Structure formats: structure tokens, C-alpha cells
Amino acid sequence: MPKKATGAADLLASVEHAARAAVSAAGPHLVTRRRWGHDWRAGTDLVCLVGRFSSHVGVEFWRGSSLAPDHPMLEGTGKNLRHVKLRTVAEARSAEFASLVRAAVELDGRSEPRRR
């Protein structure tokens, strides 16, 4: 029988697991690329990364500024990056988050492969 999440750390581990599952469902072809000390999920280019912080799970979107107009849950003002802060499993499993991740994967699929 699975262990129940009892503390904040257990809750965030569950949120992180649900966020990673959403990314895997939207982009089963994505691979892991290590960049700047973090594991990014990538296709043609970097797509997103999932990281656990002390009070939330952050999901960074490499081309988030292109996604922001259609996905108001995105935060940030950088040239390209945008992020989402997930605090509950329900948020990580929400249709809104799934739609955002699918859009990021689709946007990557329309990109030209990067020259390395």
C-alpha cells in the first residue's frame, strides 16, 4: 500500500510527481538534457524543467513568452522564460496545466532543430 503524504515535503514530492507525469504524458518523446545544473525535458530544443522548492513545485518553460498570451497561469517577465508555481496535486493534474504543457510540446515540434 502506498505511503500517505503527511508533511509539506511529502505533499511537494506528490506535486512534483504529478507535474512530471503531465510532462511525460504530453511529450513521451522528450529526452532529458542537463543544462546549467538542471535536468530539462527537450525535443527539438529545451521545453521545460520541473523543480521542487521549499513551498512549491516550479515548472520553467523555455519558450514561455510565446505561450503566455494563451496561458495566464504563466508568471515572469523575462525575454523567453516563464514559469508556473504548483502547490497542490490538483493544480499539477489540472486541465489548464495539461493544456500549457501540451502547447509547449507542440511549439517545440514546430521548431527547427538546433545546431549543436
Image (tube, rainbow, N blue to C red):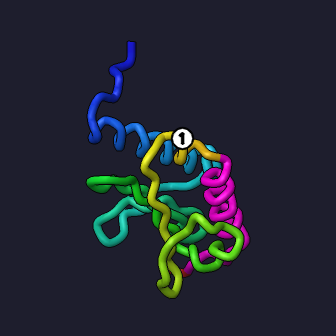
At horizontal 36% and vertical 63% (from top left) the residue drawn is 34
Q: Is residue 112 magenta?
A: yes
Name the residue that disc number 1 marks. Answer: 90
Q: Is residue 77 magenta?
A: no
Provide the major secondary structure of the magenta segment.
helix
With 84 as the anchor, is 97 left or right in this view? right
Compared with 92, 45 (above or below) is: below
Magenta residues span 95-114
Instruction: Pinpoint residue 80: horizontal percent, then vertical percent.
Output: 53, 82
With 25 as the anchor, is 76 left or right in this view? left
At horizontal 37% and vertical 53% (from top left) the residue drawn is 56
Instruction: Pinpoint residue 69: horizontal percent, then vertical percent.
Output: 68, 76
At horizontal 54% and vertical 81% (from top left) the residue drawn is 115
Q: Amino acid at mark 1?
A: Ala
Specify the quadrant that holds the N terminus. top left
SS for dot 1: helix
At horizontal 35% and vertical 43% (from top left) the residue drawn is 12
Instruction: Pinpoint residue 86: horizontal percent, then vertical percent.
Output: 46, 53
